[in-house]
Image (cartoon, helix red, strand yellow):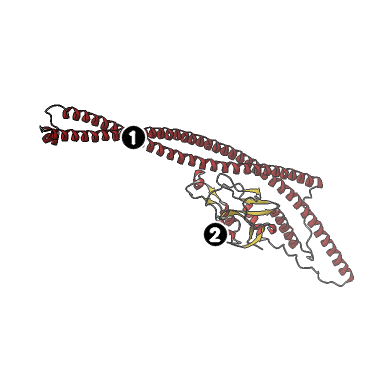
């Protein structure tokens, strides 16, 4: 509507220059159309109704975007929970495998201990039978066992008793070792059983986390689809509002041109009357005319806003946009690629600002650099045409152009389009950047 009004002013200026006051012999042109008050009021009523509808849809969209943001946060949380469950499952699987290996080793040790005891018991029986059998010899004891004297026989008996006792002691130690290894085997089997239970629980937790993540992603996708529908409805009504405002501007322009015509005609009549009076008095004289009025000074910030608004409805394309207009997006290896931005012609947030300020100020294609490209003013003093930014300690991640009245124009994110939206104060930077004025 502002462009239309400037156009009307320029038209009026041309009319005044063409039929300047003080020009003689120039008649005022035929009267232009003069719309009635009822036509103008009807046009305004229609525009107001459309503006109200845009406001209602804007509020709905803002609520939907807030819900979508919450759902995105939920998806990120579920993704992290799924990652945790995966790590826990891997840890439980490793622990179960280690416990099973320990159990197998303990069983092997217990079996070996049992076999050693059995062999020792067999050896002990063989030793006793061979030692006390008449005429037998056992290894290196043959010299004593073959003696005939009582003294030699006593020595033989003592030696056999000592060797037999030693073997019995060894047998006791083997039996004690078997008991310990059997206890260790039982403990290892119990540990393996517990580790298996933990592994099963971890697997169930992983399945549950994966299911929760899938549910959260579906909810996000459903909400994103709803937001897209709301955005389209809002865009349609905005186009209708633009058409209604254009109609009102046209009617008001016609009325203004008619009033300018009346004023010009009155000046022509007064000039003719003055010339006639001079002629009748015989004084002659030359017409006096004042200088032609100057046109209104152009506002570069309005040109910036007009350029930005002219691209409403263009697709978001990450990396897209330059001083000449929309351009093909580029790959980011992540979210933008999943939306196919590299195959779209459009703008990202900083690319739209480059295009809007082309001819007024050259900007880099990075919102962080754009934040420091001009004079920074507190948000409490922001005005139409200032740049608004969002970010945090990690840096700036978004930029938009403030329109006044709590509204802004932006290229929001992948999957959406250039739009007018209410200013979002969550995560907004404390300063606006003023490039003009």
Residue 30 in sight in this render? no
Percent of width and height locating residue 424: 65, 50
Q: Which SS class for mark 2? A: loop
Image point (37%, 33%), residue name: 183
Work out whether residue 409 or residue 186 is closer to the camera in this orientation and state it: 186
Q: Which SS class for mark 1? A: helix
Work out whether residue 328 or residue 286 is closer to the camera in this orientation and state it: 328
Percent of width and height locating residue 291: 76, 68
Percent of width and height locating residue 78: 53, 40
Image point (23%, 30%), residue name: 119
Which of the numbered marks, if any, corresponds to residue 181?
1
Res 27 quadrant in image? bottom right
Residue 242 in sight in this render? yes
Q: Which residue in the protein does label 2 denote?
A: 364
Residue 382 lies left or right of residue 133; in this view the side is right
Work out whether residue 154 or residue 178 is closer to the camera in this orientation and state it: 154
Q: Is residue 211 above or below residue 377?
A: above
């Amino acid at each position: 509507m502002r462009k239309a009004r400037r156009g009307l002013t320029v038209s009026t200026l041309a009319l005044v220059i063409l039929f300047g006051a003080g020009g003689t012999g120039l008649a005022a042109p035929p009267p232009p159309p003069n719309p009635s008050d009822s036509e103008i009021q009807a046009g305004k009523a229609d525009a107001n109704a459309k503006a109200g509808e845009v406001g209602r849809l804007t509020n709905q969209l803002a609520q939907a975007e807030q819900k979508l943001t919450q759902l995105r946060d939920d998806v990120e949380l579920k993704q992290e929970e799924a990652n945790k469950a995966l790590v826990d499952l891997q840890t439980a699987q490793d622990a179960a495998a280690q416990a099973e290996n320990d159990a197998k080793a303990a069983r092997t040790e217990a079996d070996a201990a049992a076999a050693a005891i059995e062999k020792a018991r067999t050896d002990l029986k063989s030793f006793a039978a061979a030692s006390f059998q008449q005429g037998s010899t056992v290894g290196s004891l043959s010299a004593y066992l073959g003696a005939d004297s009582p003294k030699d026989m006593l020595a033989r008996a003592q030696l056999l008793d000592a060797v037999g006792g030693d073997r019995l002691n060894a047998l006791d130690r083997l039996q004690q070792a078997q008991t310990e290894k059997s206890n260790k085997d039982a403990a290892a089997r119990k540990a393996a059983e517990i580790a298996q239970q933990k592994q099963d629980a971890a697997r169930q937790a992983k399945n549950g986390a994966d299911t929760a993540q899938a549910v959260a992603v579906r909810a996000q996708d459903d909400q994103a689809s709803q937001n897209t529908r709301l955005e389209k409805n809002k865009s349609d009504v905005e186009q209708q509002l633009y058409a209604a405002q254009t109609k009102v501007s046209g009617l008001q322009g016609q009325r203004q041109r008619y009033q300018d015509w009346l004023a010009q005609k009155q000046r022509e009549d007064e000039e003719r009357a003055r010339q006639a009076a001079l002629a009748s008095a015989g004084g002659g004289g030359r017409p006096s005319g004042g200088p032609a009025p100057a046109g209104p000074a152009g506002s570069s910030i309005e040109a910036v806003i007009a350029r930005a608004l002219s691209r409403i409805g263009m697709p978001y394309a990450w990396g897209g946009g330059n001083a000449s207009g929309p351009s093909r997006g580029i790959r980011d290896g992540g979210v933008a690629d999943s939306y196919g931005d590299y195959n779209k012609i459009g703008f990202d947030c900083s690319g739209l600002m480059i295009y809007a300020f082309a001819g007024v100020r050259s900007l880099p294609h990075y919102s962080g650099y754009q934040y420091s490209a001009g004079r920074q003013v507190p948000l409490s003093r922001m005005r139409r045409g200032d740049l608004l930014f969002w970010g945090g300690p990690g840096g700036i991640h978004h930029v938009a152009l403030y329109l006044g009245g709590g509204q802004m124009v932006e290229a929001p994110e992948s999957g959406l389009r250039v739009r007018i939206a209410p200013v979002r104060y969550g995560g907004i930077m404390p300063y606006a950047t003023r490039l003009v004025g």
